[in-house]
Image: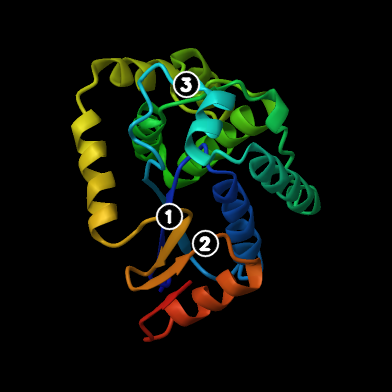
Amino acid sequence: MASEPLTIDVFADPVCPWCWLGKRRLDAALAARPDVNAEVRWRPYQLDPSVPPEGADRAEYLEAKFGDVARVRATHEQLVAIGRDEGVAFLFGEIERFPNTLDCHRAIRLAAEEGLVAQGAFVEQLFELYFTEGEDISSPDVIARAADEAGLDVETLMERLDSDDDSEDVRDEIERARAMGIDGVPCFIFAGKLVVMGAHPPEVLLEAVDRALGDEDDVED
């Protein structure tokens, strides 16, 4: 008899560089446990839902939000070095816009209907397009490109995205995440009970996998 799947809910935002590192580290952890039947489900979370629908000039946005541009630049340099060691190519200089990611999250939610593997591939493409090509991932054309490269049914996804029917559902899901106490991303919830916040190294996520398969409840920071 096949084992019950281990559900892993990942709350993330496609404009969060730590979320891309978190995804890669989770992939590495699961690769070390090929016997585990894992179902990774990507959940919506917006770091800043106040960003206007058309997005904002990224340099102006970062200066207004953080003030200390030198500190932001130093953080980016650190992320570039970390990413290089983990096969993630951050090219922050290519990014001109800071997008509102609501439509990204709507598309990610719809992608799950084609399977969780397809959803994960789509998320990876969004990270790639934003952080290595500087694309505006709130643009329908860019979302369609990510969907195509992930092997999704682009026409159906874009038709449904154009309807705007599920926007409130996604906003509600984001608010529920905040109500649960999630105040940053990435946030991993293993088997609906074990919470790990942050882009921890693969060995930490691997330990969480093993613990979630047992009976322990806990929260990792």
- When the figure is inspected, residue 130 is found, relative to residue 180, above or below; the finding is above
Residue name at image x 47 percent, y 21 percent: 56
* Number of marks present in the image shown: 3
For residue 76, side relative to residue 183 (left or right): right
Question: Which quadrant of the rendered structure holds the N terminus?
Answer: bottom left
Q: Which amino acid does label 2 sit on?
A: Gly
- What colour scheme governs how the chains and residues are painted in the rendered image of this protein? rainbow
Q: Which of marks 2 and 1 is nearer the N terminus?
A: 1
Residue where numbered disc 1 is placed: 184
Residue where numbered disc 2 is placed: 198
- The picture places residue 152, in percent across and down from the top left corner, at 47, 28
Q: Earlier in the sequence, mark 3 or mark 1?
A: 3
Q: Which amino acid does label 1 sit on?
A: Gly
Q: What residue type is labelled 3?
A: Ala
- The picture places residue 35, in percent across and down from the top left corner, at 57, 71
Please state which of the two labelled residues, at mark 3 or mark 1, is closer to the viewer.
3
- When the figure is inspected, residue 150 is found, relative to residue 199, above or below; the finding is above
Who is closer to the viewer here, 131 or 121? 131
For residue 204, side relative to residue 220 (left or right): right
